[in-house]
Image (cartoon, rainbow, N blue to C red):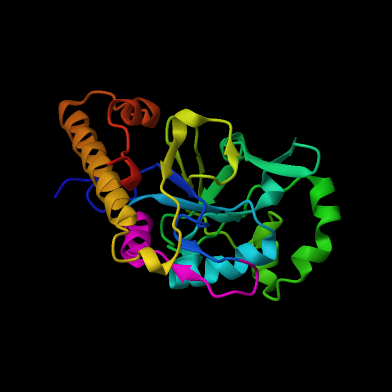
Amino acid sequence: MNNSQHLKIPIVIAIDYNHTLMMRKTSGKPIHLRPHVHEFIEFIMQNFYVINWTSTPAKLSHEGAKVVYGPYEDYLLCNLTKFHCQIKQKGPKKLNPTKDLKTIWTHYFQIDPALVAKTFPSPHVKEDFEINHAKEVKEITDPKAQNLYLGVNPQGSRLNSNTRPLRFSRLNTILIEGVGNADFMQPDNRILVSEYKGPIYNRTDNELANLKGYLNTLATYYRAEFDKCEKNGTEFEFQIREYMKKYPYISQTSQ
C-alpha cells in the first residue's frame, strides 16, 4: 500500500458554512442543511484539515457548527468568527467582514498525529475584539467552545509529547465561500460555490456532490504525485494556487 493512502493531505480547507453548507433566514429560525452535506463533511474531514470560518457572531457560529458538523465538530482544527475578520466600512452604515488568510498562515497549529480530535488552540483574536465582545462569547454555554473562539488551548498543558507544529501558507490553503458571503483578500486561494437558497431547491441542488468530486480528484492527484516523487527519490512540490488555476472549480450555477 502506498504511504500516502490513509494520511490527511497537508492542505487546509477553511469553509464558511453559511449559505454554503446550510441556510437560516434569521437567528432563532430553523437551520436547513444543504443536500449531500453529511457525505461532504465526512469526506473533507478524512482527507484534509478543516477550519470553520464564519463572519457571524461567535454564539451563532457555535450553534450553526453543532448542527452542520455534528460529531465532526470535534475534528475541526478551530472555529473562526467575525473576531478573526478584518472589519471594513462598506457604505455609510454597513460594516463588511473581510477574511484574510494570513490569520491562518501566521499561526502554528499544534497537531498530535496520534489523536484525531483537536488538541490545539485557534489563532488568537485581537485584544480589543476580545474585550469588546467578551459578553457575546460568554453567551456560549460550553466553556470549551468559549476558549476555542478566543484562542485558548482546551487541553492546557496536556499535549502529547508527539505533538508537532503544522503551519499552512498560500501553497496549501483553500477558502470555500458561498457567493455573497464575506469579502476575501486572497482570491487565488478561494473556491466560490453557488448560494444555498433553501429546501425548496433541494431536488436540483447538487453543489456539494459536485464540490466533493472536485476535491476528490485533487486529493487523488496529490497522492499520486507524492508517491511518484517518493518512488523516484525526487523532491515533491505542490502549489494549490497553480492547481486551481489549471483546473478551476466549476460551480453548479456555471454549468
Residue 136 occupies quadrant: bottom right
Splitting the image into 4 quarters, where does residue 150 fall? bottom right
Question: Does the image show residue 224?
Answer: yes
Start-end of magenta stretch: 26-46
Q: Nearer the viewer, residue 92 or 100?
A: 92
Q: Is residue 28 magenta?
A: yes
> Between 127 and 209, which is closer to the camera in this rendering?
209
Q: Is residue 138 left or right of residue 185?
A: right
The residue drawn where x is 32% and y is 26% is 237
Residue 221: image quadrant is: top left
Report x, y in % for residue 226. Answer: 24, 35
Location of residue 75 in the rendering, given as x and y in whole percent from the top left corner: 46, 62
Q: Position of residue 168 (x, y in %)?
A: 49, 37
Q: Position of residue 116 (x, y in %)?
A: 42, 62
Q: Residue at x 39, y 68 (%)?
A: 200
Quarter of the image for the C terminus: give it. Answer: top left
Q: Is residue 44 left or right of residue 71?
A: left
